[in-house]
Image: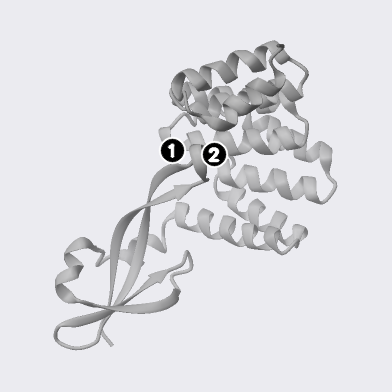
Amino acid sequence: MNVKIYLKQEEIKLGCGSTAKSTKVDNYFQAIEVDEEHVEIRLLDCFDQPVGKGSVIHKDELKDFSPCPDYFKTKKNSKEFLIEKHIHSGDRHMAQKEFFSAEHEYNRALSLDDNHLKANLGMGKALFARGKKDASKKIFSKLSSLDALYEKENKHIFNEVGIELRKRKMFEEAISNYLKAISIDPKDEVLYYNLGRAFYEEGKREEAIQHLKQALTLKSDFREASEFLSKIQPS
C-alpha cells in the first residue's frame, strides 16, 4: 500500500457572532492511491491516526496540498510534537473529568518545556478541578509572568488564560494576561471587551467603561460590548 503524507493549511473560525475570529491551522492528511488517477485522503490526528471518513479525489487536486516525504522521520523526534501529544491526552482526560490522569499528562508535557503556555494552562485547570487551589493559583500566577512568550500566536492563549482566571475570580492575574495579549495585538476589540469584564467583576467600573469604549472605538458594531456598556454605564 503506497501511503503518502500531505499538508494543507486551512482557515477555521473561532467563536461566533461579532467576536468570531479566523485563524490558520496546519492539517496533515494520509493519501492512499486508489487507482492511476485517484487517491483517498483522510485527516490525521496528533497521534498520526486517520480519523473520519475518507474522501476520494483526483490526483490533480493534490496541487492544493504540500507533500511531506519526511513527515514521520521529523515529527516523531520533535519535542514540540511530544509536548502537543501529552497536552492533547490531558485535554481528553479533562473532558472526561479524569483530573488526576489529566494532571499526569500535563506534567509530562511540562517536563519537556516548563514554560509551555498550553501545558501550564492545562495544569492550572486540572489542579483547580482537583481542589488544589493554592497550587492552581501558583501556576496561573506563573503564566502571568512569562514575559519571554510574546509571539503573535500566543495572543489567544493569553486571552484564554485570562478567561480561566476571571472565572476563578483571580482578577489581578486575569487583567495581567489580557494586558499581555493587548501588548501583542492592540487592535483586537475582543481583548478590550474581556479586560472590561474583568475590571467590572473586580469592582472597578470606571476602568471597565474605559476599556469597553476602546473596544467600541475599534469595532463600532460590537454588540456584546455595546450592551454591556449600556448595562454598567451611569445614565
| Local SS, label 2 | helix
Residue pointed to by mark 2: 157
Q: Amino acid at mark 2?
A: Ile
Residue pointed to by mark 1: 153
Q: How many marks?
A: 2
Outermost right residue: 131
Q: In percent of the image, x 55 and y 31: which residue is there?
A: 223
Q: Quadrant of residue 146?
A: top right
Q: In percent of the image, x 19 and y 88: which residue is there?
A: 35
Which quarter of the rendered picture does the C terminus lie within?
Answer: top right
User: Vertically, is 139 above or below 203?
Assistant: below
The reply, left or right, for residue 185 in relation to residue 116 is: left
Q: In percent of the image, x 51 and y 37: which residue is there?
A: 19
Work out whether residue 60 or residue 26 is closer to the camera in this orientation and state it. Answer: 60
The reply, left or right, for residue 232 in relation to residue 44 is: right
Q: Amino acid at mark 1?
A: Glu
Work out whether residue 177 or residue 187 is closer to the camera in this orientation and state it. Answer: 187
- Residue 170 makes an appearance in the image: yes
Where is residue 115 drawn, in percent x and y? 57, 38
Which quarter of the rendered picture does the N terminus lie within?
Answer: bottom left
Say whether marks 2 and 1 touch (CB < 8 Å). Answer: yes
Where is residue 131 drawn, in percent x and y? 85, 47
| Local SS, label 1 | helix
